[in-house]
Image: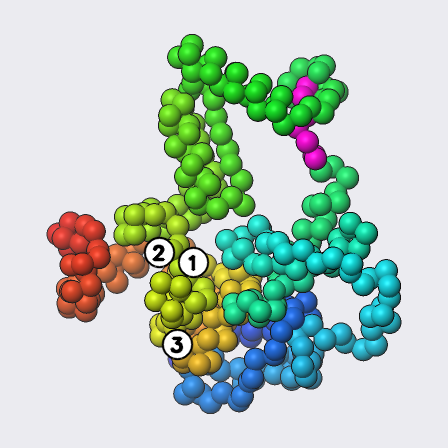
Protein backbone atom coordinates (compact mmCIF):
# COMPACT_ATOMS: atom_id res chain seq x y z
CA UNK A 1 0.00 0.00 0.00
CA UNK A 2 1.30 3.48 -0.80
CA UNK A 3 1.98 6.07 1.86
CA UNK A 4 -0.93 8.03 0.44
CA UNK A 5 -3.23 5.06 0.91
CA UNK A 6 -2.03 4.63 4.47
CA UNK A 7 -2.70 8.28 5.18
CA UNK A 8 -6.25 8.03 3.81
CA UNK A 9 -6.96 4.94 5.86
CA UNK A 10 -5.52 6.57 8.98
CA UNK A 11 -7.71 9.65 8.49
CA UNK A 12 -10.83 7.52 7.98
CA UNK A 13 -10.12 5.53 11.16
CA UNK A 14 -9.45 8.76 13.05
CA UNK A 15 -12.76 10.23 11.89
CA UNK A 16 -14.64 7.09 12.83
CA UNK A 17 -13.13 7.03 16.31
CA UNK A 18 -13.89 10.72 16.79
CA UNK A 19 -17.51 10.32 15.69
CA UNK A 20 -17.98 7.25 17.90
CA UNK A 21 -16.58 9.15 20.88
CA UNK A 22 -18.97 12.05 20.16
CA UNK A 23 -21.87 9.62 19.86
CA UNK A 24 -20.91 8.01 23.17
CA UNK A 25 -20.76 11.41 24.88
CA UNK A 26 -24.13 12.36 23.36
CA UNK A 27 -25.63 9.10 24.56
CA UNK A 28 -24.41 9.87 28.07
CA UNK A 29 -26.10 13.30 28.01
CA UNK A 30 -29.30 11.80 26.64
CA UNK A 31 -29.18 9.10 29.30
CA UNK A 32 -29.06 11.63 32.12
CA UNK A 33 -32.02 13.59 30.71
CA UNK A 34 -34.29 10.62 30.02
CA UNK A 35 -36.62 8.41 32.02
CA UNK A 36 -37.54 4.78 31.62
CA UNK A 37 -35.80 1.41 31.66
CA UNK A 38 -32.23 1.17 30.48
CA UNK A 39 -32.18 -1.23 27.51
CA UNK A 40 -30.21 -4.39 28.11
CA UNK A 41 -26.81 -4.47 26.47
CA UNK A 42 -24.38 -7.23 25.68
CA UNK A 43 -20.94 -7.53 24.18
CA UNK A 44 -21.24 -7.58 20.41
CA UNK A 45 -19.06 -9.86 18.29
CA UNK A 46 -17.63 -8.75 14.98
CA UNK A 47 -20.31 -10.71 13.15
CA UNK A 48 -23.23 -9.44 15.20
CA UNK A 49 -24.06 -6.56 12.86
CA UNK A 50 -22.90 -3.85 15.29
CA UNK A 51 -20.02 -1.56 14.35
CA UNK A 52 -16.62 -2.54 15.67
CA UNK A 53 -15.35 -0.37 18.51
CA UNK A 54 -11.98 -1.87 19.41
CA UNK A 55 -8.97 0.44 19.67
CA UNK A 56 -11.19 3.40 20.48
CA UNK A 57 -10.17 6.04 23.01
CA UNK A 58 -10.73 5.01 26.62
CA UNK A 59 -13.64 7.43 26.92
CA UNK A 60 -15.52 5.48 24.22
CA UNK A 61 -14.59 1.93 25.27
CA UNK A 62 -14.65 2.33 29.03
CA UNK A 63 -18.23 1.87 30.23
CA UNK A 64 -17.30 3.51 33.51
CA UNK A 65 -16.78 6.75 31.60
CA UNK A 66 -20.50 6.86 30.82
CA UNK A 67 -23.03 6.87 33.70
CA UNK A 68 -24.84 3.52 33.81
CA UNK A 69 -27.92 3.88 36.08
CA UNK A 70 -29.23 0.61 37.42
CA UNK A 71 -32.96 1.25 37.31
CA UNK A 72 -33.81 4.52 35.61
CA UNK A 73 -32.08 6.35 32.83
CA UNK A 74 -32.85 9.61 34.64
CA UNK A 75 -31.35 8.46 37.93
CA UNK A 76 -29.33 11.27 39.49
CA UNK A 77 -25.55 11.07 39.56
CA UNK A 78 -24.36 11.50 43.16
CA UNK A 79 -26.52 12.94 45.94
CA UNK A 80 -29.74 14.70 44.94
CA UNK A 81 -30.20 17.37 47.60
CA UNK A 82 -33.31 18.82 45.92
CA UNK A 83 -35.36 15.63 45.55
CA UNK A 84 -37.53 16.34 48.59
CA UNK A 85 -37.69 20.09 48.03
CA UNK A 86 -41.26 21.38 48.31
CA UNK A 87 -40.45 24.10 45.79
CA UNK A 88 -39.62 21.45 43.18
CA UNK A 89 -42.56 19.15 43.87
CA UNK A 90 -45.23 19.75 41.21
CA UNK A 91 -48.81 20.44 42.17
CA UNK A 92 -49.94 19.72 38.60
CA UNK A 93 -48.64 17.71 35.62
CA UNK A 94 -49.86 18.67 32.13
CA UNK A 95 -49.55 16.52 28.99
CA UNK A 96 -48.07 18.35 26.01
CA UNK A 97 -45.86 17.75 22.97
CA UNK A 98 -42.53 19.08 21.74
CA UNK A 99 -42.76 20.99 18.45
CA UNK A 100 -39.09 21.39 17.61
CA UNK A 101 -39.04 18.53 15.09
CA UNK A 102 -41.34 15.99 13.46
CA UNK A 103 -40.67 13.43 16.19
CA UNK A 104 -43.31 15.32 18.22
CA UNK A 105 -42.21 13.76 21.51
CA UNK A 106 -44.79 13.63 24.27
CA UNK A 107 -44.06 15.83 27.27
CA UNK A 108 -44.95 15.73 30.93
CA UNK A 109 -44.87 19.37 32.01
CA UNK A 110 -44.52 19.75 35.79
CA UNK A 111 -46.09 22.90 37.22
CA UNK A 112 -45.78 24.59 40.60
CA UNK A 113 -48.10 27.50 41.32
CA UNK A 114 -48.81 27.79 37.61
CA UNK A 115 -45.13 27.92 36.55
CA UNK A 116 -43.06 25.27 34.76
CA UNK A 117 -40.48 23.69 37.04
CA UNK A 118 -39.57 20.63 34.95
CA UNK A 119 -40.25 19.00 31.57
CA UNK A 120 -39.90 15.22 31.24
CA UNK A 121 -40.64 12.65 28.56
CA UNK A 122 -43.58 10.23 28.51
CA UNK A 123 -42.36 6.99 30.17
CA UNK A 124 -45.21 4.90 28.73
CA UNK A 125 -44.51 5.85 25.10
CA UNK A 126 -42.88 2.84 23.38
CA UNK A 127 -40.75 5.03 21.14
CA UNK A 128 -39.61 7.58 23.69
CA UNK A 129 -39.31 5.22 26.66
CA UNK A 130 -39.36 8.42 28.72
CA UNK A 131 -36.61 10.00 26.66
CA UNK A 132 -36.19 13.58 25.48
CA UNK A 133 -33.36 15.33 23.74
CA UNK A 134 -32.13 18.70 24.95
CA UNK A 135 -34.71 20.61 22.86
CA UNK A 136 -37.76 19.44 24.85
CA UNK A 137 -36.80 20.80 28.29
CA UNK A 138 -35.61 24.05 26.69
CA UNK A 139 -39.18 24.87 25.62
CA UNK A 140 -39.60 26.47 29.04
CA UNK A 141 -37.15 29.13 27.89
CA UNK A 142 -39.53 30.05 25.08
CA UNK A 143 -42.45 30.31 27.48
CA UNK A 144 -40.65 32.64 29.88
CA UNK A 145 -38.50 34.56 27.40
CA UNK A 146 -38.86 38.27 28.14
CA UNK A 147 -39.15 39.01 24.41
CA UNK A 148 -42.00 36.56 23.84
CA UNK A 149 -45.10 38.08 22.24
CA UNK A 150 -48.21 36.90 24.08
CA UNK A 151 -50.75 38.66 21.87
CA UNK A 152 -50.90 40.44 18.50
CA UNK A 153 -49.13 43.81 18.28
CA UNK A 154 -50.10 46.66 15.94
CA UNK A 155 -47.75 49.40 14.79
CA UNK A 156 -49.14 52.73 15.99
CA UNK A 157 -46.26 55.07 15.10
CA UNK A 158 -43.16 55.09 12.95
CA UNK A 159 -42.51 53.49 9.58
CA UNK A 160 -42.32 49.83 8.71
CA UNK A 161 -38.89 48.50 9.65
CA UNK A 162 -38.06 51.55 11.75
CA UNK A 163 -36.21 50.54 14.93
CA UNK A 164 -38.02 53.33 16.78
CA UNK A 165 -41.52 52.31 15.67
CA UNK A 166 -44.05 51.87 18.46
CA UNK A 167 -46.44 48.95 18.84
CA UNK A 168 -49.54 48.46 20.94
CA UNK A 169 -51.27 45.18 21.90
CA UNK A 170 -54.60 44.39 20.24
CA UNK A 171 -57.07 41.51 20.51
CA UNK A 172 -56.99 38.45 18.27
CA UNK A 173 -60.37 39.41 16.82
CA UNK A 174 -59.08 42.84 15.81
CA UNK A 175 -55.86 41.38 14.38
CA UNK A 176 -57.64 38.74 12.27
CA UNK A 177 -60.23 41.27 11.07
CA UNK A 178 -57.46 43.70 10.03
CA UNK A 179 -55.55 41.00 8.13
CA UNK A 180 -58.68 39.68 6.41
CA UNK A 181 -59.74 43.18 5.35
CA UNK A 182 -56.36 43.91 3.75
CA UNK A 183 -56.18 40.50 2.08
CA UNK A 184 -59.62 40.89 0.52
CA UNK A 185 -58.90 44.46 -0.58
CA UNK A 186 -55.75 43.32 -2.41
CA UNK A 187 -57.59 40.37 -3.93
CA UNK A 188 -60.44 42.55 -5.20
CA UNK A 189 -57.91 44.98 -6.67
CA UNK A 190 -56.25 42.08 -8.55
CA UNK A 191 -53.13 42.55 -6.45
CA UNK A 192 -53.13 39.26 -4.52
CA UNK A 193 -49.64 38.56 -5.85
CA UNK A 194 -48.47 41.30 -3.51
CA UNK A 195 -49.18 38.99 -0.55
CA UNK A 196 -46.50 36.55 0.59
CA UNK A 197 -46.42 33.88 3.28
CA UNK A 198 -43.44 32.19 4.96
CA UNK A 199 -44.39 29.55 7.52
CA UNK A 200 -42.32 28.03 10.27
CA UNK A 201 -40.55 24.70 9.96
CA UNK A 202 -42.20 23.69 13.24
CA UNK A 203 -45.58 23.32 11.53
CA UNK A 204 -46.83 19.83 10.65
CA UNK A 205 -47.10 19.02 6.94
CA UNK A 206 -50.89 18.95 7.15
CA UNK A 207 -51.04 22.55 8.40
CA UNK A 208 -48.66 23.73 5.68
CA UNK A 209 -50.90 22.05 3.09
CA UNK A 210 -53.93 24.00 4.33
CA UNK A 211 -52.03 27.30 4.16
CA UNK A 212 -50.86 26.50 0.63
CA UNK A 213 -54.43 25.82 -0.49
CA UNK A 214 -55.62 29.03 1.14
CA UNK A 215 -53.09 31.11 -0.79
CA UNK A 216 -54.00 29.32 -4.01
CA UNK A 217 -57.65 30.31 -3.49
CA UNK A 218 -56.57 33.84 -2.62
CA UNK A 219 -54.69 34.08 -5.91
CA UNK A 220 -51.15 34.39 -4.59
CA UNK A 221 -48.38 31.95 -5.55
CA UNK A 222 -46.08 33.43 -2.92
CA UNK A 223 -46.34 30.80 -0.22
CA UNK A 224 -43.25 28.99 0.99
CA UNK A 225 -41.68 27.31 3.99
CA UNK A 226 -38.48 25.43 4.81
CA UNK A 227 -39.52 22.58 2.52
CA UNK A 228 -37.63 23.59 -0.66
CA UNK A 229 -34.33 23.37 1.23
CA UNK A 230 -35.38 20.55 3.55
CA UNK A 231 -37.79 17.65 3.03
CA UNK A 232 -40.16 18.56 0.19
CA UNK A 233 -38.77 15.74 -1.96
CA UNK A 234 -39.88 13.20 0.62
CA UNK A 235 -43.28 14.85 0.92
CA UNK A 236 -43.78 14.80 -2.85
CA UNK A 237 -42.87 11.10 -2.96
CA UNK A 238 -45.34 10.36 -0.17
CA UNK A 239 -48.08 12.30 -1.96
CA UNK A 240 -47.50 10.38 -5.20
CA UNK A 241 -47.38 7.02 -3.44
CA UNK A 242 -49.93 7.42 -0.65
CA UNK A 243 -52.00 10.41 -1.76
CA UNK A 244 -50.93 12.35 1.33
CA UNK A 245 -47.74 14.36 1.76
CA UNK A 246 -47.07 13.13 5.28
CA UNK A 247 -46.39 9.88 7.06
CA UNK A 248 -49.41 7.65 7.70
CA UNK A 249 -47.41 5.69 10.25
CA UNK A 250 -43.78 5.33 11.17
CA UNK A 251 -42.39 5.02 14.66
CA UNK A 252 -44.15 2.79 17.13
CA UNK A 253 -47.19 0.58 16.65
CA UNK A 254 -49.24 1.00 13.46
CA UNK A 255 -52.87 0.91 14.56
CA UNK A 256 -54.04 -0.28 11.13
CA UNK A 257 -52.04 -3.50 11.13
CA UNK A 258 -51.11 -3.84 14.81
CA UNK A 259 -47.40 -4.15 14.03
CA UNK A 260 -44.28 -2.04 14.22
CA UNK A 261 -43.42 -0.21 11.01
CA UNK A 262 -39.92 1.24 11.08
CA UNK A 263 -39.06 -0.71 14.20
CA UNK A 264 -39.61 -3.99 12.36
CA UNK A 265 -37.40 -3.09 9.40
CA UNK A 266 -34.57 -5.46 8.57
CA UNK A 267 -32.62 -2.91 6.52
CA UNK A 268 -32.24 0.77 7.41
CA UNK A 269 -30.86 3.13 4.74
CA UNK A 270 -30.15 6.71 5.80
CA UNK A 271 -29.32 8.99 2.88
CA UNK A 272 -27.83 12.35 3.83
CA UNK A 273 -29.50 12.48 7.23
CA UNK A 274 -27.80 12.67 10.61
CA UNK A 275 -30.59 11.26 12.77
CA UNK A 276 -28.38 10.67 15.80
CA UNK A 277 -28.10 14.44 16.28
CA UNK A 278 -31.24 15.81 14.61
CA UNK A 279 -33.74 13.23 15.94
CA UNK A 280 -31.91 11.51 18.80
CA UNK A 281 -35.00 10.11 20.53
CA UNK A 282 -36.39 8.28 17.50
CA UNK A 283 -32.88 7.22 16.45
CA UNK A 284 -32.34 5.70 19.90
CA UNK A 285 -35.60 3.80 19.39
CA UNK A 286 -34.34 2.36 16.09
CA UNK A 287 -31.11 1.29 17.78
CA UNK A 288 -33.08 -0.48 20.52
CA UNK A 289 -35.22 -2.25 17.94
CA UNK A 290 -32.10 -3.11 15.96
CA UNK A 291 -30.84 -5.16 18.91
CA UNK A 292 -33.90 -7.37 18.45
CA UNK A 293 -34.19 -7.43 14.65
CA UNK A 294 -30.46 -7.43 13.80
CA UNK A 295 -31.33 -4.91 11.08
CA UNK A 296 -28.48 -3.72 8.90
CA UNK A 297 -27.86 0.02 9.12
CA UNK A 298 -26.35 1.75 6.08
CA UNK A 299 -25.59 5.47 6.10
CA UNK A 300 -24.76 7.41 2.92
CA UNK A 301 -23.20 10.76 3.78
CA UNK A 302 -20.01 12.55 2.66
CA UNK A 303 -19.33 13.28 6.33
CA UNK A 304 -18.77 10.71 9.05
CA UNK A 305 -21.45 11.79 11.50
CA UNK A 306 -22.45 10.13 14.80
CA UNK A 307 -25.14 8.37 12.74
CA UNK A 308 -22.56 7.01 10.33
CA UNK A 309 -20.43 5.89 13.26
CA UNK A 310 -23.28 3.60 14.36
CA UNK A 311 -23.69 2.08 10.89
CA UNK A 312 -22.65 -1.32 9.63
CA UNK A 313 -21.67 0.40 6.38
CA UNK A 314 -20.82 4.08 6.00
CA UNK A 315 -20.70 5.09 2.33
CA UNK A 316 -19.12 8.46 1.61
CA UNK A 317 -19.86 9.70 -1.93
CA UNK A 318 -18.36 12.90 -3.25
CA UNK A 319 -20.48 15.92 -2.25
CA UNK A 320 -23.41 16.65 -4.61
CA UNK A 321 -23.27 13.20 -6.22
CA UNK A 322 -26.14 11.74 -4.17
CA UNK A 323 -28.55 11.78 -7.10
CA UNK A 324 -26.07 10.03 -9.39
CA UNK A 325 -25.62 7.34 -6.75
CA UNK A 326 -29.39 6.83 -6.37
CA UNK A 327 -29.92 6.69 -10.13
CA UNK A 328 -27.15 4.11 -10.34
CA UNK A 329 -28.85 2.04 -7.65
CA UNK A 330 -32.17 2.27 -9.50
CA UNK A 331 -30.55 1.18 -12.76
CA UNK A 332 -28.91 -1.80 -11.06
CA UNK A 333 -32.17 -2.88 -9.38
CA UNK A 334 -34.30 -2.54 -12.53
CA UNK A 335 -31.72 -4.00 -14.92
CA UNK A 336 -31.39 -7.15 -12.80
CA UNK A 337 -35.08 -7.41 -11.84
CA UNK A 338 -34.23 -7.08 -8.16
CA UNK A 339 -37.66 -5.68 -7.23
CA UNK A 340 -41.00 -7.04 -6.11
CA UNK A 341 -43.01 -6.89 -9.34
CA UNK A 342 -46.35 -7.57 -7.63
CA UNK A 343 -45.76 -4.74 -5.16
CA UNK A 344 -44.69 -2.36 -7.94
CA UNK A 345 -47.77 -3.11 -10.06
CA UNK A 346 -50.07 -2.55 -7.10
CA UNK A 347 -48.53 0.45 -5.39
CA UNK A 348 -45.90 2.27 -7.47
CA UNK A 349 -46.84 5.18 -9.74
CA UNK A 350 -44.71 6.02 -12.79
CA UNK A 351 -42.54 2.91 -12.69
CA UNK A 352 -42.65 2.30 -16.45
CA UNK A 353 -41.72 5.92 -17.14
CA UNK A 354 -38.78 5.54 -14.76
CA UNK A 355 -37.77 2.26 -16.38
CA UNK A 356 -37.77 3.78 -19.86
CA UNK A 357 -35.70 6.85 -18.99
Query: Magenta stretch containing residue 152, yes or no?
Result: yes
Q: Viewed as shown, does residue 329 lie left or right of 356?
A: right
Q: Position of residue 313 (x, y in %)?
A: 40, 73
**In what quadrant of the picture does the N terminus appear?**
bottom left
Query: Looking at the rendered structure, which numbered label has been put on residue 272?
Result: 1
Q: Where is residue 53 in the image (x, y as percent from the top left)?
A: 53, 82
Q: How many marks?
A: 3
Disc number lying in front (2 or 3): 3
Query: Magenta stretch containing residue 83, yes or no?
Result: no
Which residue does the image show at 37% across and 28% down from the upper left? 216
Q: Nearer the viewer, residue 191 or 175?
A: 175
Q: Residue furthest top?
A: 189
Q: Image quarter for residue 294?
A: bottom left
Q: Viewed as shown, does residue 113 lie left or right of 94?
A: right
* First along the sequence among labels 1 and 3: 1
Which residue position is annotated with label 2?
322
Tell me, yes or no, whether the two marked residues, 1 and 3, touch with CB atoms within 8 Å: no
Which residue does the image show at 40% across and 79% down from the upper left? 293
Q: Which of 286 and 61 is in front in this view?
A: 286
Task: Estimate the spatial distance between the alpha carbons at disc 1 and disc 3, rounded to whole Å.
Answer: 19 Å
Task: Estimate the spatial distance between the alpha carbons at disc 2 and disc 3, rounded to whole Å.
Answer: 23 Å
Task: Estimate the spatial distance between the alpha carbons at disc 2 and disc 1, rounded to whole Å.
Answer: 8 Å
Q: Position of residue 247 (x, y in %)?
A: 39, 54
Which residue position is annotated with label 3?
295
* First along the sequence among labels 2 and 1: 1
Say if 320 sits above or below 157 in the image.
below
* Label 1: element kind: loop
Query: Label 2: few (<14), some or many (≥20) within 10 Å?
Result: some
Can residue 15 be seen here? The reply is no
Query: Label 3: few (<14), some or many (≥20) within 10 Å?
Result: many
Q: What stretch is highlighted in magenta?
A: 149-155
Amino acid sequence: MTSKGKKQKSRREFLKKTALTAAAAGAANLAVSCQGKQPETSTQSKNSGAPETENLPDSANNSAAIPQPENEVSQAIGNDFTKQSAALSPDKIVDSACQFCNSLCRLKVHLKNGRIIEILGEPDDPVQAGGLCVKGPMMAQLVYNRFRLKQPMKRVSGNKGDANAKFAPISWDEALATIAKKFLALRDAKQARGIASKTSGRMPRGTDALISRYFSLLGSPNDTDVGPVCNDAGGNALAKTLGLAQFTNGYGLDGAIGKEDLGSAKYLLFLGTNQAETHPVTFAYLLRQRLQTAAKLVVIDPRLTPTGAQADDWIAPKPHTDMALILGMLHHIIDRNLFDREFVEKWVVGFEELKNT
